[in-house]
Image: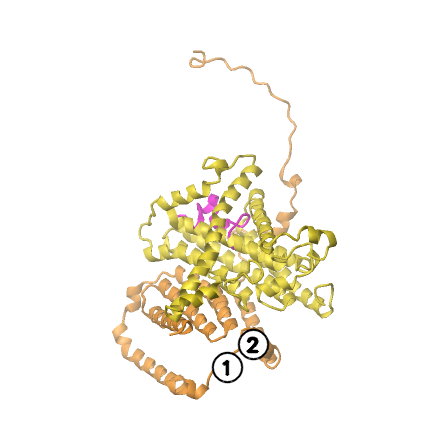
Amino acid sequence: MFDALQAFLSGFLYDWLAVLITLVIQAVVVILPIMLAVAWLTYAERKVIGYMQVRMGPNRVGPGGWLQPIADALKLMTKEVIFPNQSNKFLFIVAPVLSIAPAVAVWAVIPFSPEVVVSDINAGILYVLAVSSILVYGTIIAGWASNSKYAFLGALRGSAQKISYEIAMGFALVTVLMIAGSMNLQEIVEGQQGGIWHWYLLPLLPMFVVYFLSGLAETNRTPFDIVEGEAEIVAGFHVEYSGMTFGVFMLAEYAMMILISFMTAIMFLGGWLSPFEGIPVLETVFAWVPAFGWLAFKVSFLLFVFIWLRATFPRYRYDQLMRLGWKVLIPVTIVWVFVVGAMQYFKVGPWFN
Amino acid sequence: MTFEQFIFYLLGAMAVISGLMVITVKNPVKAALWLVLAFISTAGVWIMAQAEFLGLVLILVYVGAVMVLFLFVVMMLDINLAQMKEGFTKYLPFGAIAAIATFAMMYMVLGPAHFGLEVTGNPVQHPADYSNTKAIGVPLYTTHAYAFVLAAVLLLVGIVAAIALTLRRRAPKEVLYQDINKQNKTSVKDRLTLVKMDAVVEKPVASKGEESK
């Protein structure tokens, strides 16, 4: 469809302009639904946590509170953006941009169903890892440019946490590409064909847990949200931000949550594949579910787990968090790299034949 | 102009401008951030040259990890710029000589005579499914295995040395240490004692002036 559009545009425009316009349209087609998903994810979070704590959650704006995200967005957009005294104005504005830009740029390589992907590149996993590693700068610069002690402490904590957990995350990805033999996300999903016991969830169960925990830490979600430990440092790196500049940080955080869920679903839960492949009756019963339906179901479940954990666990202490990352998760991943190597060499299970 | 050329010139311009800004801006934090931009645009140029593995690893390692640590250090510094500018004119001739000498040497080795299509020939066009990750990985672990292992050992020595230099136990009076095992092993019995007490029934307090009204 987009190839046809590009061919049509290049009929009367410069070649590069036609490509650029097509790319912008593609980007909008991907980013707009994600931003909408982010908006209603905040609503879902407040509702779910509300019910878990025997409250109603937001229920005033629109039927059942369904228009709450729009009200929130309008409120944030109309609020004044306050610049702290002697802050670095340019970097103060750049920081939220730097945190939202990678969070949406990552979506370029995420496949939504077979062949539905903006850019089907060979090094998909590496791209996701590289681009999400740029996210740290949003945190650091926000903390530094605010000219505030609390914001700076929050930024130091946050960035140290992010780069620590990125290592565990990278190792978890290494095991995935060892099994799949490819860094292309579509090929990784296709490698898990053949029902639930062919998913990488089973041979990589510890890696699944490690990846999801690191994802929690990367997105600063409870129990790892010491970046904004209210009791200690007020609200962390974005304490000086107000209005939409603050809203952009939240957008980035929730977009990254959805991204982590997508990546977990694609790499460990068989992406858009049905869990009932190869099971006689169930396969035909569930044949009507579209490919994206399964992916959306898995992603929604993982997002629910994000919210569930937030409603359940208290915050980690900072030294406990660092200990978990460096002394528990990273050794586990390194051991599992060797385990996967051995399983592959001796052809254990249905995954390595 | 094709779209590839447009992107190439854009990234090239970004790399050159950000490289210049690194050495001209006054604020060291901003200089570090310009360096990050220089890395990113260089990675983009590498990806344009079909070296996507190297480009992405450049971003992952240098932008994602090295520059973050660099920024940590730079942010903590309290640099007095006026003091640093002191004696600028005094040292200018030496600096200029060193710069010219360096530039001349680099020109001899990396000058335009060594580049261009006449020297290198047309670059090989790889098909879309060509994996340059494999193209790097296979020689790295076969022909260059010893050099690779040696580099890894060097890095390990660096890690061990850095930890050995900085790890020291200070007296418990100065620093409080956490013993995680001990913390995990504590149970309710160690921390909490329940005391059985008789219920105390309070006698009604003799009513005061404001309560009786």
**Which chain hosts label 1?**
B
What residue appears at the point 54 percent right and 62 percent down from the top-left corner? Answer: B167
Q: Which residues are magenta?
A: A218-242
Left or right of A32, for residue B153: right
Left or right: B199 in relation to B64: right
Amino acid at the residue labelled 1: Val
Q: Is residue B89 magenta?
A: no
Q: Give the left or right position of residue A197, taking residue A126 as reference.
A: right
**Rendering coords of residue A258 (x, y %):** 53, 53
Within 10 Å of the Cα at label 2, are there few (<14), some (14-19), or many (20+) other Cα atoms? Answer: few
Chain for colour yellow: A
Q: In the image, which disc is placed on residue A137?
A: none
Q: Is residue A323 visible?
A: no
Which is more N-terminal, label 1 or label 2? Answer: 1
Q: Residue at x 52, y 52 (%)?
A: A257
Q: Position of residue B57 (x, y in %)?
A: 51, 69
The tally of labels here is: 2
> What residue does disc 1 label?
B124
Residue at point 40%, 56% (across, down): A97
Foreground pick, B174 / A251: A251
Q: Is residue A232 magenta?
A: yes
Q: Tag on residue B136?
A: 2
The image shows residue A273 at horizontal and vertical percentages of 63, 57
Chain for colour orange = B
The residues tagged by marks 2 and 1 sit, at their Cα atoms, a distance apart of: 16 Å
Instruction: Give, as a three-letter code, the residue at label 2.
Output: Ile
Q: Nearer the viewer, residue A165 or A197?
A: A197
Give the image location of residue A111, x and y in percent: 55, 60
In the rendered structure, the residue with mark 2 lies on which chain?
Answer: B
Q: Which image quadrant for residue B148?
A: bottom right
Asked which secondary structure carries label 2, the reply is helix
